[in-house]
């Protein structure tokens, strides 16, 4: 069993994880992280290894039972612009940057899979390991993140990938080491919205001579809340966050320009279209009453991750065989966060299964959510994570 074999080299993986945590790198800047991944994969003896799309890494491990299918496993490399406040001995040494989303654990988990499968090749076909940059990169300039770029640069070809799996750690005291599965939608999708509001400047004592861009922006933001409360199906949850608003130069001057930016999250494409249509209608209405002009830019972000039912069944069976009956639980609802993992399936049509791995906080630290400056998850999740992913890959290829 893989869970027994990983005991032999777990201390090495724990040390790699702590090193990566100490030296986090932002999206598009994962140079040191990528170099470590390349070095370790060469050392473990993968059959093919290449740099893809700047800091991305793709490796291939061939089984010794002849030709067959190819399954891919993905991990993400990047950290977040967060100042760490965990007090760990291996806290970030890169000011203002932190592995607050557990990608250091994802990398070391997939490196562990590489070592397990290079040393135990009793499977048909091949396993492709994808170490992806820039999962956290979505922004108005590049809303799609790193997954789509990796696909565009051929990570699912040569050999062609037939299925793909991935996981994300989840800070939790509930059954650490257990996998959360779900058929169908397992994460939200999101679209980024930019609002450029142009008015007419005036002195604060003479508002009638101008068109107040701040007032128009305020009305727009308040009215957008009714898209969620009144325009979307209440059984199809949507979330609106307007996270940025900028405008004005002085407290007694009516400004002629305001920028606002926000994110709508949803769980199906129909809801995404409803959101878009009503957002534009509201902007047109605010234009009419304010005298301002409002440019609405809707940028498609990450789509919902839509798990293939048969792949989920296979994952459940493999995880229970490898880790025991308690290793799996089924999620009643999708996670509210989003993941660019969705693009691997959407761009290619291949089946996918994305999973959550419950991971306890490090002893002596508090339970903190992902993206928190205090998020400190135990390295112990590497063991079930790697053993679980390796067992799924082998079961898929040999099945």
Image (tube, grey):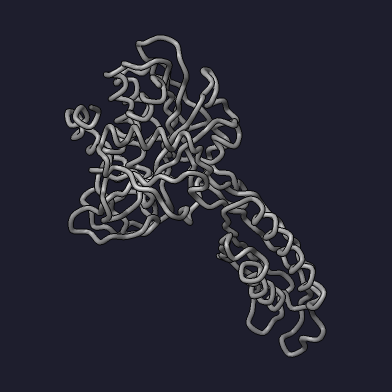
Can the viewer see residue 36 in this picture? no
Q: Is residue 35 above or below residue 367?
A: above
The image position of residue 347, as x and y in percent, is 61, 34
Q: Nearer the viewer, residue 54 or 306?
A: 306
Q: Tell me the quadrant of the picture where the C terminus can be found.
A: top left
In the displayed structure, 338 sits above or below 341; it is: below
Q: Between residues 147 and 229, which one lies in front from this camera angle?
A: 229
Q: Quadrant of residue 144?
A: top right
- Where residue 247 sits, quadrant-wise, is bottom right
Position of 83 compared to 175: left or right? right
Image quarter of the N terminus: top left
Residue 274, placed above or below residue 258 = above
- Give the residue at the far bottom of this rendering: 205
- In the image, 296 versus 114, the foreground residue is 114
Which residue is located at x 52 percent, y 26 percent?
Answer: 155
User: Which residue is found at the position 64% from the left and 49% from the top?
Assistant: 300
Is residue 195 visible in the rendered image? The answer is: yes
């Amino acid at each position: 069993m893989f869970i027994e074999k990983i005991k032999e080299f777990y201390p090495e993986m724990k040390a790699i994880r702590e090193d990566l945590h100490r030296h986090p790198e932002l999206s598009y800047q994962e140079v040191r992280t990528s170099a470590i991944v390349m070095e370790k994969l060469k050392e473990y003896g993968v059959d093919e290894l290449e740099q893809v799309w700047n800091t991305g890494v793709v490796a291939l491990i061939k089984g010794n039972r002849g030709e067959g299918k190819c399954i891919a496993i993905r991990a993400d490399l990047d950290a977040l612009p967060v100042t760490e406040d965990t007090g760990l001995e291996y806290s970030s040494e890169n000011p203002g940057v932190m592995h607050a989303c557990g990608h250091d654990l994802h990398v070391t988990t997939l490196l562990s899979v590489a070592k397990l499968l290079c040393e135990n090749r009793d499977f048909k076909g091949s396993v492709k390991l994808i170490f992806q940059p820039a999962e956290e990169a979505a922004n108005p300039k590049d809303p799609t993140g790193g997954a789509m770029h990796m696909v565009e640069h051929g990570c699912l070809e040569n050999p062609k990938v037939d299925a793909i799996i991935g996981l994300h750690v989840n800070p939790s005291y509930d059954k650490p080491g257990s996998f959360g599965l779900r058929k169908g939608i397992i994460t939200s999708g999101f679209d980024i919205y930019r609002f450029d509001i142009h008015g007419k400047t005036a002195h604060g004592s003479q508002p009638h001579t101008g068109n107040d861009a701040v007032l128009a922006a305020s009305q727009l933001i308040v009215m957008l809340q009714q898209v969620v409360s009144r325009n979307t199906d209440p059984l199809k949850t949507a979330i609106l966050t307007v996270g940025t608003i900028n405008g004005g130069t002085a407290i007694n001057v009516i400004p002629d320009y305001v920028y606002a930016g926000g994110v709508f999250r949803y769980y199906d494409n129909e809801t995404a279209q409803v959101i878009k249509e009503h957002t534009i209608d509201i902007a047109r209405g605010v234009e009419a009453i304010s005298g301002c002009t409002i440019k609405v830019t809707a940028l498609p972000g990450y789509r919902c991750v839509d798990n293939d039912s048969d792949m989920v069944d296979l994952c459940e069976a493999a995880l229970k065989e490898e880790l025991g009956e308690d290793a799996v639980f089924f999620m009643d609802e999708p996670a509210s966060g989003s993941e660019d993992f969705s693009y691997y399936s959407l761009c290619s049509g291949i089946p996918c299964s994305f999973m959550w791995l419950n991971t306890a906080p490090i002893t002596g630290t508090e339970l903190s959510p992902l993206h928190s400056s205090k998020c400190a998850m135990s390295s112990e999740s590497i063991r079930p994570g790697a053993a679980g992913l390796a067992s799924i890959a082998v079961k898929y290829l040999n099945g």
